Image (cartoon, rainbow, N blue to C red):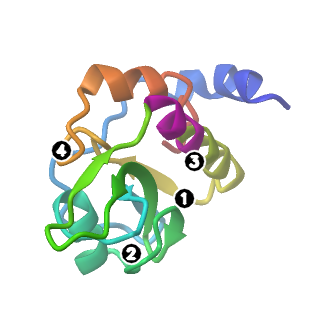
């Protein structure tokens, strides 16, 4: 089934569900979804929370680890200052598509998606929101 059809079917279930602003604990079936950098160096923001509380691993930039799921939004430059720059929106969109497919294939989980890319990466909610438009899978 194509993702468009999957999304149309699940849209009814997805209406009016939002991730809390501050996630302080997870149920056993919940996954903390955060914006990472391409090196998986979880230094600040939601990435640091994911590392400290929800099983994200240092060096793992994409996908599920513990009760966290990483979506890269920054390119990490290995300088002393740890300077990072934004990934192109198209590249982030590809990671989001992979995430949506993963969530669809793992209905046993509820994915609590933070405002990925809207903190340290500096994207606007609208920029990332446009990429998330097709994420109406009932468990996201």
- Whichever of callouts 2 and 3 sits on the residue coming sooner in the sequence is 2
Q: Is disc 2 in contact with disc 3, using a CB cutoff of under 8 Å?
A: no
Q: Secondary structure at mark 4?
A: loop
- The residue lying toward the viewer, choosing from 32 and 48, is 48
Could you tell me how far apart the alpha carbons at marks 1 and 3 are, in whole angstroms?
13 Å
**Residue receiving disc 3:** 99
Check the image and name the residue furthest to the right.
Answer: 1
**Residue receiving disc 1:** 109
- Whichever of callouts 1 and 2 sits on the residue coming sooner in the sequence is 2
Residue 89, percent across and down?
A: 44, 31
- Whichever of callouts 3 and 4 sits on the residue coming sooner in the sequence is 3
Q: Which tag is nearer the camera, tag 3 or tag 4?
A: 4
Could you tell me how far apart the alpha carbons at marks 2 and 4 are, in whole angstroms?
18 Å
**Residue receiving disc 2:** 56
Could you tell me how far apart the alpha carbons at marks 3 and 4 are, in whole angstroms?
19 Å
Q: Is residue 25 visible?
A: no
**Residue receiving disc 4:** 119
Could you tell me how far apart the alpha carbons at marks 1 and 2 are, in whole angstroms?
16 Å
Q: Secondary structure at mark 2?
A: loop
- Whichever of callouts 1 and 3 sits on the residue coming sooner in the sequence is 3
Residue 82, percent across and down?
A: 20, 66
Q: Is residue 39 above or below residue 95?
A: below
Residue 21, percent across and down?
A: 17, 45
Please report the bounds of the magenta region as a residue range: 89-95
Q: Which tag is nearer the camera, tag 1 or tag 3?
A: 3
């Amino acid at each position: 089934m194509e993702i468009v059809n999957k999304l149309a079917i699940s849209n009814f279930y997805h209406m009016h569900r939002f991730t809390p602003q501050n996630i302080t604990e997870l149920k056993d079936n919940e996954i903390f979804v955060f914006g990472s950098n391409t090196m998986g160096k979880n230094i600040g923001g939601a990435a640091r929370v994911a590392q400290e509380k929800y099983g994200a691993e240092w060096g793992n930039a994409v996908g599920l680890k513990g009760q966290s799921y990483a979506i890269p939004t920054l390119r990490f430059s290995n300088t002393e200052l740890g300077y990072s720059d934004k990934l192109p929106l198209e590249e982030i969109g590809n990671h989001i598509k992979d995430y949506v497919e993963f969530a669809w294939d793992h209905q046993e989980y509820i994915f609590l998606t933070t405002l990925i890319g809207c903190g340290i990466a500096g994207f606007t909610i609208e920029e990332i929101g446009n990429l998330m438009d097709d994420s109406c899978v009932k468990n996201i």
